[in-house]
Structure formats: structure tokens, C-alpha cells
């Protein structure tokens, strides 16, 4: 849970425009999450799972992690959002951000659950709802303390048009339409 505290500290540093604080806070936040999940996955009693299914999750877990990194570090430019002074000057609403306002939560949830299943870890599987709730709480904090203040009416419009973390049929359609537009461009 410490990772969420470091994440909130990073958000506050972003809001207060403290660029010197952002890189170390981001590093500690990421390291905290990875360390906690690996410890839960590796130091746990195992549950039975067919080998072929475990192999499926061994593929899906890193794919989910990679997709999370893509959403958080590439669709939102790493340097502007996470490392430099302030926050973004342009709201990202396309790509995976057409699915939900916080697609990182989707991929984080998949990563945690798929890692638990790949490792056959009772502890990580039991901790998954708490970890996901912490992530949802963190992005709810971001919405209230950072994003609505940073982007104003543009963000409020995005809130009206795009779901918080759970995609809807309409948001999936918007996402797929965006993929088609990008493929035809």
C-alpha cells in the first residue's frame, strides 16, 4: 500500500510544480508496487491450476504489464507527465484513454490477477481486491486534486463522455473507431 502513498506524494508534487521531487517519487512508487506484488506472488502457498492454464497466464501477465506501461508512459508522454515541472498541458482522450479515463487501472488489475494465477499464489490472489481498490482510490484522488484543476472544463467534458475505470459498450466502440482511424491514416 506504500506505493499509493508515494503516488499521491508524486501527484501533490506535480500539482505544486516541484519538478525535483517527481522523478524520485515516481521511482519509489513503481519500485514499491513491483516489490510488493513479487513478494506476494513468490512467498505464498500455491493453489492447483492446470499447467496449460498457468502458461496462458504467464503470457498474459507481462502483456498486461506492458500495456499498462504503454498507457501510462507513452500515451501520456513520460517526460511531461511524470518527470518535469507541472503536469500535462494537453488532455489525452484517445487510444486506451478512449476506453476509460484511467486505463492503467484496467491493465494493473489484469497484471495483478494474471500474475497471481501464473504464480498460483493464494496471497496475491487474496490481496488483489485490496491492491485494485488502492489503485482506484489513487486515481480518484488524481481526478479531484490534480486533473480537474489542471484541465478544467475539458476534463469535466471528458468525465461526461468517458467512464472512470470500467469500459462501456460506447467507450469500447470509440476505442475501436480510433484504432480504425489510425490504421487508415
Image (cartoon, helix red, strand yellow):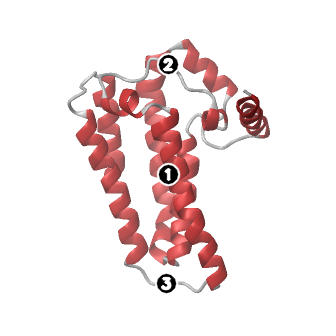
Question: Depth-wise, is mark 3 or mark 2 nearer the camera?
Answer: 2
Question: Depth-wise, is mark 2 or mark 1 nearer the camera?
Answer: 2
Residue located 78% across and 36% down the image: 173
Residue 34 shows up from this direction: yes
* SS state under label 2: loop
The C terminus: image quadrant: top right
Query: Residue 41: x, y in percent?
Result: 43, 72
Query: Residue 28: x, y in percent?
Result: 27, 48
* SS state under label 1: helix
Residue farthest front in this picture: 185
Residue at label 1?
133
Query: Residue 26: x, y in percent?
Result: 31, 42
Residue located 45% across and 74% down the image: 123
Question: Rounded to the nearest whole Å, what is the CA distance between mark 3 and mark 2?
Answer: 45 Å
* SS state under label 3: loop
Looking at the rendering, which quadrant does residue 89 occupy?
A: top left
Residue at label 2?
90
In the picture provided, is 122 more to the left or to the right than 175?
A: left
Residue 108 shows up from this direction: no
Residue farthest top in this picture: 153
Question: Rounded to the nearest whole Å, what is the CA distance between mark 1 and mark 3?
Answer: 24 Å
Question: Depth-wise, is mark 1 or mark 3 nearer the camera?
Answer: 3
Q: Is residue 161 above or below residue 6?
A: above
Contact between marks 2 and 1 (CB within 8 A): the answer is no
Residue farthest left in this picture: 20
Residue located 27% across and 34% down the image: 22
In the picture provided, is 8 more to the left or to the right than 155?
A: left
Question: Rounded to the nearest whole Å, what is the CA distance between mark 2 and mark 1?
Answer: 28 Å
Looking at the rendering, which quadrant does residue 150 occupy?
A: top left
The label number, if any, that marks residue 46 in the structure image: 3
| Disc 1: CA contacts within 10 A as few (<14), some (14-19) or many (>=20) | some
Contact between marks 3 and 2 (CB within 8 A): the answer is no
Amino acid at each position: 500500500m506504500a506505493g499509493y502513498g508515494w503516488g499521491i506524494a508524486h501527484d501533490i508534487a506535480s500539482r505544486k510544480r516541484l519538478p525535483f521531487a517527481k522523478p524520485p517519487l515516481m521511482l519509489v512508487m513503481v519500485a514499491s508496487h513491483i516489490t510488493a506484488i513479487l513478494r506476494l506472488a513468490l512467498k505464498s502457498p500455491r493453489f492447483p491450476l492446470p499447467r496449460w492454464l498457468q502458461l496462458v497466464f504467464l503470457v498474459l501477465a507481462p502483456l498486461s504489464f506492458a500495456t499498462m506501461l504503454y498507457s501510462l508512459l507513452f500515451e501520456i508522454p513520460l517526460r511531461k507527465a511524470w518527470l518535469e515541472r507541472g503536469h500535462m498541458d494537453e488532455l489525452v482522450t484517445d487510444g486506451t484513454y478512449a476506453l476509460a479515463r484511467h486505463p492503467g487501472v484496467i491493465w494493473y488489475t489484469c497484471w495483478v490477477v494474471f500474475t497471481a494465477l501464473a504464480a498460483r499464489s493464494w496471497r496475491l490472489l487474496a490481496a488483489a481486491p485490496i491492491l485494485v481498490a488502492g489503485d482506484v482510490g489513487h486515481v480518484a484522488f488524481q481526478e479531484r486534486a490534480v486533473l480537474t484543476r489542471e484541465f478544467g472544463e475539458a476534463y469535466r467534458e471528458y468525465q461526461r463522455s468517458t467512464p472512470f475505470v470500467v469500459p462501456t459498450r460506447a467507450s469500447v466502440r470509440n476505442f475501436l473507431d480510433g484504432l480504425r482511424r489510425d490504421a487508415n491514416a
